[in-house]
Amino acid sequence: DAGVIQSPRHEVTEMGQEVTLRCKPISGHNSLFWYRQTMMRGLELLIYFNNNVPIDDSGMPEDRFSAKMPNASFSTLKIQPSEPRDSAVYFCASSPGTRGNTIYFGEGSWLTVV
Amino acid sequence: AQSVTQLGSHVSVSEGALVLLRCNYSSSVPPYLFWYVQYPNQGLQLLLKYTTGATLVKGINGFEAEFKKSETSFHLTKPSAHMSDAAEYFCAVSDSARQLTFGSGTQLTVLP
């Protein structure tokens, strides 16, 4: 079975540009998570969805960040405008949605903003 | 609120030696506990988890962890380290919500 699929795997962009990261969760999973990983702050939960509805977005750093889940098989994380401090690895993850279920991670999108 | 503390951001062991990675948690309800491993340039992969039942949990690649409520700990062990175990290891806790709170990670180095 296919795991969580993220694109792009690597992106280099200039400050001020819009960045869109994409995620396809595992089929049948009800919960989707966006995490950010940096050396300084470790793994941070940005937002999570249950049944396509955003449940907790308290981790979204600021208004430049937005996330959508228009259907059960697709989600986007958008940064507009991007800044150098947004450089990080962004992980999408999904789970069947019940507490205690394993959360499965994608390979990550490596973002560099110059 | 829930939190996880991983003692030691870097641990080095010799090949064949015992691996012990420490994790302490804080949770307002009985916790569900997880260990994930991250190899370079990859996502996180589940090693093992504790939800209910037996407090000694066995995972993949010969790892195991024991839930000790009295010590609020969930330390990860492996009797004999292999070079392929070199990676970053994350402990995580879930209380009443669906998401996980991760520790800061422990980088394991295995020396030949």
Image: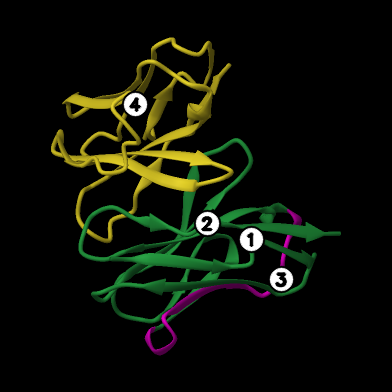
Q: Which chain is yellow?
A: A
Checking the image for residue A23, the label placed there is 4
Residue at the image position 48 percent from the left and 28 percent from the top: A86
Count of numbered circles in the view = 4
Magenta segment boundaries in residue numbering: B69-83
Q: CA distance from mark 1 to mark 3?
A: 20 Å
The label nearer to you, 1 versus 3, is 1
Label 3's element? loop
Residue at the image position 39 percent from the left and 89 percent from the top: B70
Left or right: residue A24 compared with residue A41: left
For mark 1, what is the residue? B9
In the rendered image, the quadrant that contains the N terminus of chain A is: top left
Q: CA distance from mark 2 to mark 4?
A: 24 Å
Query: Dots 1 and 3: beta carbons under 8 Å?
Result: no
Checking the image for residue B104, the label placed there is 2
The chain letter under disc 4 is A
Percent of width and height locating residue B74: 47, 75
Label 4's element? strand
Q: Is residue B16 magenta?
A: no
Amino acid under label 4? Cys
The chain letter under disc 1 is B
In the rendered image, the quadrant that contains the C terminus of chain A is: top right
Query: Dots 3 and 2: beta carbons under 8 Å?
Result: no
Q: Which chain is green?
A: B
Residue at the image position 49 percent from the left and 40 percent from the top: A37
Amino acid under label 1? Ser
Farthest residue, direction bottom: B70
Query: Dots 1 and 2: beta carbons under 8 Å?
Result: yes
Left or right: residue B60 compared with residue A79: right
Label 1's element? loop
